Image (cartoon, helix red, strand yellow):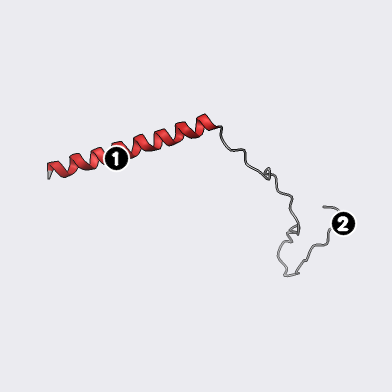
Amino acid sequence: MQGEAHQIIHTGEPIIAVPTHVEPNLPLQVPVGSVPETIFAIAVLIRSIALLIKVIGQQKERK
């Protein structure tokens, strides 16, 4: 950040200099889970939806 120019407006308030360029600290590509993890996640999602449908059906039967 040395040598960078900062735009400063004098207003009588404390001065806060903000850099014009900030390097990202995250990797460019986020690693994707492996195939077994993806299959497991899909299976859990399907099971959750099935249980939700079952509970909704039970609620309708009670009415």
Identify which residue, 56 or 24, lies in the foreground. Answer: 56
Question: For the view shown, which residue lies furthest in the right direction?
Answer: 3
Q: Is residue 8 above or below residue 19?
A: below
Disc sitting over residue 13 in the figure: none
Up-down: is 18 above or below 24? below
Dot 1: element: helix
- Above or below 18: residue 26: above
Position of the C terminus by quadrant: top left
Q: Which of 55 and 22 is in front in this view?
A: 55
CA gap between label 2 and label 1 equals 60 Å
Residue at point 73% right, 68% down?
Answer: 12
Q: What SS does tag 2 mark? A: loop
Q: In this view, does 2 lie above or below 14?
A: above
Q: Which quarter of the picture shows residue 34?
A: top right
Q: Nearer the viewer, mark 2 or mark 1?
A: 1
Could you tell whether 45 is left or right of 56 in the image?
Answer: right
Residue 10 image point, x, y percent = 76, 69
Dot placed on the residue nearer the N-terminal end, 2 or 1:
2
Q: Are marks 2 and 1 in contact (CB under 8 Å)?
A: no
x then y, percent, for residue 39: 47, 33
Residue farthest along the left direction in this orientation: 63
- Total marks in image: 2
Circle 1 residue = 52
- Which of the 4 image quarters holds residue 9? bottom right
**Amino acid, disc 1:** Leu
Q: Hey, what amino acid is under mark 2?
A: Gly
Left or right of 45? Residue 13 is right
Q: In which quarter of the image is residue 30?
A: top right
Q: Residue at x 56, y 35 (%)?
A: 33
Query: Which numbered circle lies on residue 3?
Result: 2
Q: How crowded is mark 1: few (under 14 residues within 10 Å), some or many (20 or more)?
A: few
Q: From the viewer's perspective, tell me whether residue 59 is left or right of residue 38.
A: left
